[in-house]
């Protein structure tokens, strides 16, 4: 009886080891990189401003005094409608893009910024402010550019990105790269577009991702890396082994208890 149980456990363990083996075709990135001709990227990527973004906007120029009214100050915080916040480290104020896609800008009031890029907003403000002051310089940046990475990576979590031009490879690198147990042909990129959550599956074994519109990330994108079939099979096998072992031990204890409690065993 013990030999049968032992052999069964050894057989299951062997199956788990075989299931855990993976070939280079399952692991290597860009396996067809030498066989394809990628088109040159002719346009620069810029993130589009969305609702709930936080923007840092600074206005400068030759005369700092005349530029002051266009910069949000702590004194104005009480009169604005929750459109700014402070960073304790830099004391830089930021504008929150509200549910209507607008910010409340000093002296100009509500401005629709949703759908603009950082460069487009800076140009728009420069033209508007330039009607009142000479040679203004407008700086616009994202304050809350975050990417969330979950699943089979070494360090899952939410990362604040310093640059707005980030691709999926850079993001995965921030998370410590994929585990060997990651499914490289089934990575899911989730993105909100016009209020609807969309998703796209990425295959890192193929080079066409380099030309995909999903290669460059946007703020608040979520990357989920599922486990490959080998890990799932190994986990299921391990669970099965433990279930059989526990069940067998329980059964043996029950039988032993019954035998030793029987009158003729005394």
Image: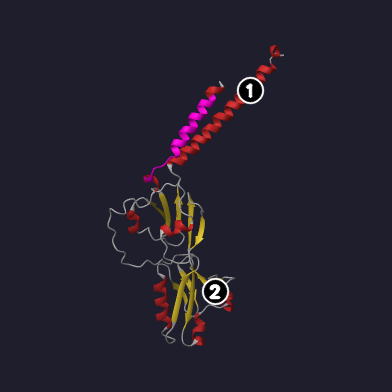
Read off the residue under disc 1. 254
Where residue 52 sits: x, y (%)?
49, 64
Q: Residue furthest top?
A: 264
Give residue 139's quadrant in the image: bottom left
Residue 8 on the magenta span: yes
Read off the residue under disc 2. 92
What whole-number distance in Å separates the C-alpha atoms at marks 2 and 1?
70 Å
Q: Which residue is drawn at the image coordinates 55% and 20% (left, top)? A: 1
Q: Nearer the viewer, residue 164 or 28?
A: 28
Q: Identify the element where label 1 is drawn.
A: helix
Q: Which residue is drawn at the image coordinates 33% and 67% (left, top)? A: 43
- Stretch of the chain drawn in magenta: 5-24
Foreground mark, 2 or 1, reads 1
In the displayed structure, 215 sits above or below 183; it is: below
Where residue 206 sits: x, y (%)?
34, 51
Q: Which residue is drawn at the image coordinates 40% and 77% (left, top)? A: 124
Q: Identify the element where label 2 is drawn.
A: loop
Q: Nearer the viewer, residue 208 or 26?
A: 26
In the displayed structure, 120 sits above or below 26; it is: below
Residue 189 visible to an observer of this rendering: yes
């Amino acid at each position: 009886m013990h030999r049968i149980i032992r052999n069964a456990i050894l057989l299951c363990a062997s199956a788990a080891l075989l299931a855990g083996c993976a070939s280079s075709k399952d692991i290597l990135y860009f396996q067809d990189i030498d066989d394809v001709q990628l088109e040159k990227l002719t346009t620069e990527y810029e993130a589009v401003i969305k609702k709930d973004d936080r923007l840092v906007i600074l206005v400068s120029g030759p005369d700092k005094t005349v530029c002051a009214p266009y910069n949000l100050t702590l004194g104005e915080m009480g009169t604005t409608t929750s459109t700014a916040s402070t960073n304790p480290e830099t004391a830089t104020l930021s504008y929150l893009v509200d549910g209507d896609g607008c910010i409340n800008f000093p002296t100009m009031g509500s401005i629709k910024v949703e759908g603009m890029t950082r460069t487009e907003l800076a140009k728009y403000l420069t033209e508007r402010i330039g009607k009142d002051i000479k040679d203004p310089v407008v700086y616009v940046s994202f304050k809350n550019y975050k990417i969330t990475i979950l699943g089979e990576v070494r360090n899952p979590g939410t990362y604040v990105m310093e640059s707005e031009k980030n691709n999926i490879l850079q993001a995965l690198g921030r998370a410590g790269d994929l585990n060997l147990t990651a499914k490289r042909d089934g990575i899911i990129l989730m993105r909100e577009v016009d209020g609807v959550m969309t998703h796209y599956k990425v295959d890192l074994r193929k080079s066409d991702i380099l030309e995909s519109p999903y290669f460059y990330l946007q703020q608040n994108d979520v990357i989920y890396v599922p486990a490959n079939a080998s890990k799932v099979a190994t986990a299921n096998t391990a669970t099965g082994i433990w279930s059989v072992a526990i069940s067998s031990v329980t059964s043996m204890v029950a039988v032993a208890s019954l035998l030793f409690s029987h009158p003729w065993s005394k």
